[in-house]
Amino acid sequence: MFGYVLITLIALSLAGFVLGRQRALAAVSGTAANLHSLPNYHGYFIAAWVGVPALVLVLVWLLFQGSVIDVLLMRSLPADKIAGLSQSELALLISEVKSVAGGAIFGTPAAHVVEAAERYNAWQSIARWAMAAAAIALALVAMLIARARIAKDFRARQGVEHVMDGLMIFCSAIAILTTLGIVTSLAIEAYRFFQLVSPLQFFFGLNWEPQIAIRADQVTAGGAFGAIPVYVGTLLIAFIAMAVATPIGLLSAIYLTEYASPKVRAVVKPLLEILAGIPTVVYGFFAVLVVAPAMRNFGQAIGFDIAPNSALAAGGVMGIMLIPFISSLSDDAIAAVPQSLRDGSYGLGATKSETIISVLLPAALPGIMGGILLAVSRAIGETMIVVMAAGIIASLTLNPFEPVTTVTVQIVTLLIGDTEFDNPKTLAAFALGLVLFLVTLCLNVIALRIVQKYREQYD
Amino acid sequence: MNDATGSVNAGIPLSAEEMSKIAPGLAHDIKIKSSDVEVHYGDKQALFDVNLDIPANQVIALIGPSGCGKSTYMRCLNRMNDTIDIARVTGTIEIDGVDIYQKKIDVVELRARVGMVFQKPNPFPKSIFENVAYGPKIHGLAASKSDMEEIVVESLTKAGLFDEVKDRLEAPGTGLSGGQQQRLCIARAIATKPEVILMDEPCSALDPIATAKIEELIDELKQNYTIVIVTHSMQQAARVSQMTAFFHLGYLVEVGETDQIFTNPQDKRTQDYITGRFG
Ligand SMILES: Nc1ncnc2c1ncn2[C@@H]1O[C@H](COP(=O)(O)OP(=O)(O)OP(=O)(O)O)[C@@H](O)[C@H]1O
Ligand SMILES: [Mg+2]
């Protein structure tokens, strides 16, 4: 049904376009030059009036149709059948009705369920037809209204401009609303978590053992939600990754802008950027199968015990992954420093490296900082490499040769397997996620600020 | 006149003017001698067969229509053309009798001896103080912090900027007005105490008062330095220079004493240019 409605609306819009053109031309008896706006703009104007409001109506309708029918369904169930049912049992009943309505019948459903299913189907089809009727009626009415406005001096061009404005605002609103939605859902679940576990324990506890019994017969530890080991692990790995990525990325950017010949640059720059395109799971393989064993052998050779899962292996490989973030942004920043500054420095008798250190890097610093902060955000949010190479045990340590775990890894492990959304084990994931989100948000804001400041500098 | 170590302040018995009174035209040693200088940018030739001797302790003005190769010639004198990949310089340029394009020449040291003020002001995004201190710092000219302060203040004063910025030496040099930035760049260039100063249109962004100050400075500097200045202002060339060289389409058309060039040019093109008939 939705498909048919959509096709009808598009057809009506096209008709509106043709109508608008014709009417506009008729208004000036065929001399387009006498119109305020070109005939096409009149066409677009009517087409927009026909299509947009009807389409919005259809979308809103579809958004609410399900829940409205659910409420009606609930109301219509016989009171004695739903008395004393809990929320989740009620939800179960509703979905049983729906599956019966869809024709999937297991065993013999109760009579009131079958009745409800029939009602449900009837309402569904009424709703569909009503939607189609409403949308087409709206489109036609809009077409009449818009058509009436077309005249010689009508500013259809500005009208179309407003429609374009609206379209763009709508698109950016989608992005913003999605972000808001994510934050709210995170915040709500995190709030529920903090009602079960005190924030004090979460933020200051040194022990992270979230495995608690879900069923009575399970044997687990008591469940401890001190997030400090997790955050320390995250910071340790991010630190190692940045210690690898920053110098290598920065120095390769300097090499590419200041030393490499255009030919070398044309080859090396894309090669470096390929690093950013490798899936992180592949980096994970690399860390587990190549780097970790190599480090372990090396450790054994010098009589040093390195765990098979270690922060160093994960952080080091993650650092390689981050190189292109830093090198690419720094490269742009250094290349954007005006040639006249280089000339000024060379003209005073500075060498190349003096020029780079005392003039280019300070001038490009904001851009470089932007790249570094972006890389830090990535390092904190990275999951796959850590799961594969650093393990999932939350030990509180700063030793890079020990296994550690990170926030994102814990979130994944908390949400895998038996989950139930009213116990602290599952909800803890949301608290972790919220804090992570806030941290990366702050970093991004700082990065944006710095990049902005840098843009203003040479204008 | 200058010994090889570059200590330029020592042992000058007479000022340039006194010298020229005693022996006009012959008074000056040749500081820079260019023979058969040609410059190509890729396939395009920008300078043709330039032979020009620049006397020490004088001001020589390079004039000529836009694009005739004045900046290009000037950039040959401190090998700034080396920083342009496609630029190729042939011929010889000798400073104090030493070919500056031979292999063993240390370009960095050469540029310390031949300072340059660029056509467009290009202060570093650092504080005013650090801008001026940049050259002395990399060449180790100041033994102590107070030495450095002295150099900075002296250079800023000579460039006629000190009074305007003395309260904000820590403010960024890029925050100055265009004319102030240009004077900052002049201060920066003289802070390294070069023997030769190349100035590419140093006054193009300046008001008449600042221009007068710079011209005064040039006059004063020529006691100790050799100065090459590019200018589009005939009056300025006449006011500050003793020698004038006229370039046209990459050729050095005519060179001579400024008075002679302006009152009695030998070449038709020179005459047309200085009387404003083209360019
Ligand atoms: N970096 C460069 N690459 C290619 N060609 C160049 C470059 N710099 C200068 N040229 C060319 O060399 C010629 C001489 O330029 P130059 O800058 O020396 O002129 P100019 O006499 O200084 O002019 P103006 O008075 O406008 O500063 C011009 O034709 C110019 O296009
Ligand atoms: Mg020039």
Image (cartoon, helix red, strand yellow):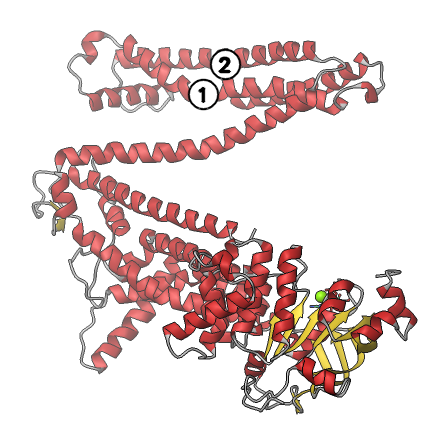
Amino acid beneath label 1? Leu
Residue found at x 15% / y 58%: A396
Residue found at x 87% / y 62%: B275
Q: Quadrant of ligand 2?
A: bottom right
Q: How far is disc 1 from disc 2 in space, using C-alphas?
A: 9 Å
Quarter of the picture holding the C terminus of chain B: bottom right
x, y percent for residue A10: 62, 23
Q: Is residue B122 above or below residue A370?
A: below
As rendered, which of A246 and A141 lies closer to the eye?
A246
Mark 1: few, some, or many residues within 10 Å (few <14, many ≥20)?
Answer: some
Q: Is mark 1 within 8 Å of ligand 1?
A: no
Q: Is residue B237 left or right of residue A433?
A: right
Residue found at x 42% / y 22%: A63
Which corner quadrant of the image does residue A337 belong to? bottom right
In the rendered structure, the residue with mark 2 lies on which chain? A
x, y percent for residue A435: 26, 43
